[in-house]
Amino acid sequence: MAPVKIIDAEGNAALSASTWFPEYEEMGPEALTIVSVLGAQASGKSTLLNKLFGTSFEIGSRSAVATATTKGVFADKAKGFDTVVAVDVEGSDSRERGREGRAFQARCAAFVTCISDVLLLNLWYHDVGRFDATSYGLLKAVFSEAAKNAGQDALRTALVFVVRDVDDDVVPSELEHLLQEDAKEIFDDVTKGEDISSMFDISVVALPHMRHREEAFTEACQNLANRILQQDAPESLAKTQFSKVIPADGIGTFTSKLWDERAASKAVTTGVTANGDEGGDGNVASLTKAFKCNEAFSQALTDATLKLNEFQESTLEGGEKIEDYGAKAAQIMTEALASYDVATEECHDDSIQTRKRRELESIIDTSQHAIYMKQLQVLRENALAHFKSGTASDDMPSDFAFYTADSQFQREAEESKRPGSSWSANQERQDLQNMMQEISTQRKRLLTSQVTAAQQQAHAMQYLQMQQSQINQIQAQAYGGSTGQWNVGAAYRPPDTNINASLSYQQGRTNIQISMVPDESASLLGPNGFTAGVGPGNLGLSFNIGL
């Protein structure tokens, strides 16, 4: 990932986001360790940071000495250490900016002094002891900025003189003593009697020539990196006393405000006026208040975040709702703001105190609202389960189950809302109603399908029964007298008449037959009404009735 531009070449804050790196949004208020480097143009500042932290700052070629490679202020994360940020500052005394650029360079020095845990002052060995050297001018800007914290809870900074191209015959202790004395002299001149040790922890690192003594140079850089990155390293610089407590997710907002305050002032308190001339201290807002507010902000936010995380881990992640979440959220908000107000009581009339308080309230509200939305999901699932169990029984009408589930969700959602907040459960309630409506519709379709299927089955059975009855009748007609059936028949002919009547019952069927013969043929009939033979006299009429 390429370094991000914090301040552009024109002197404007280049980032509008609340943080420097997108992934810092998820880190919350975790404090960063910021290491910045100051020095003359083309003195190897970017190379030094890349060696120390595995960063990828652009490095200029030796053929372009008069051209500045770093223009403005850039930041990059240390490789393998996400909370350690290296800040590369444009070199001072550049040919391109000339004298008019001194104010910008001094402002950059003051800027990184305010945010850095560790400040590296990169200078050549041959510049040691030269008070007119560029690095000494930057040192004055650094001390002038720090002097504004005098008399208060001083924010200490680890100041490391990184001396380049030191010969082997140079005695390290003598070099360190010389730089300590020079720093104290400049500091006393700026602060008028303050103790330099109350604001700075000064150390000296001598680096051999990078090209001619590459292995020794790399080893020395590694030792310095260990001091910065590891708390258990000898002479470690990774100390909480140097931390400016700048939160990862708010560093963009903080640094933009800090830079704009300096841009608005006519003379930054670095001993250099806007036109590049040396001048007196300017009148800018005290960064001590800013840091105090920021520290209180971070502490209050951390405490609130821990409490909110407990809710999610113990309940929501297990699918259970948070009982009385609205009241609990209100208590957390009240305690966080009260804690912040107490810690920033001295700054109550300062604009930054008000701004940071609004920011604290906004961030906590955002976190609580996220939990509230998860709570609504749990409440919605509970209400939906209640609706399903109600509609599963025929004893409860679906409309009543709909009403009770919706009422349950609405009541519990209102209890989960923090009093005074603008949170709304309308969308989740609408989703619940839509799901219940869909389930009701599907249930009605299922019942309709079941009724229709039952009716169709009844009609089919009725049709089959009718068909079976008809088949039975056909069988009865076709196979009359079958085993197990009985038949009855009778015939009668009234005496001296030509009428013959017969009645028969066979397999559920009654048959009546009436027949008659012509009068002129009656003599052909026998005395019992039956013909004596076959002839024309046997012909007559027959009438059958089947019941």
Image: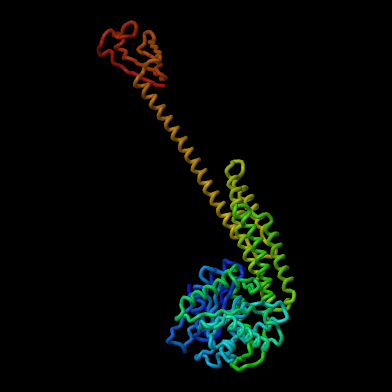
Q: Position of residue 89 (x, y in %)?
A: 54, 82
In the image, residue 126 sits, relative to residue 30, either above or below, namely below
Q: Is any part of residue 263 visible from this angle?
A: no
The C terminus lies in which quarter of the figure?
A: top left
Quarter assignment of residue 409: bottom right
In the image, residue 467 sits, relative to residue 43, either above or below, namely above
Q: Is residue 496 left or right of residue 128?
A: left
**Furthest-top residue in view?**
527
In the image, residue 228 sits, relative to residue 109, either above or below, namely above
Q: Position of residue 351 (x, y in %)?
A: 69, 78
- The one nearer the camera, 499 or 459, is 459
Q: Position of residue 529 (x, y in %)?
A: 34, 9
* Residue name at image x 73 percent, y 68 percent: 338
Q: Is any part of residue 522 visible from this angle?
A: yes
Q: Position of residue 80 (x, y in %)?
A: 52, 68
- The one nearer the camera, 110 or 188, is 188
In the image, residue 526 sits, relative to residue 184, either above or below, namely above
- The one nearer the camera, 523 or 11, is 11
Q: Is residue 515 left or right of residue 248?
A: left
**Furthest-left residue in view?**
535
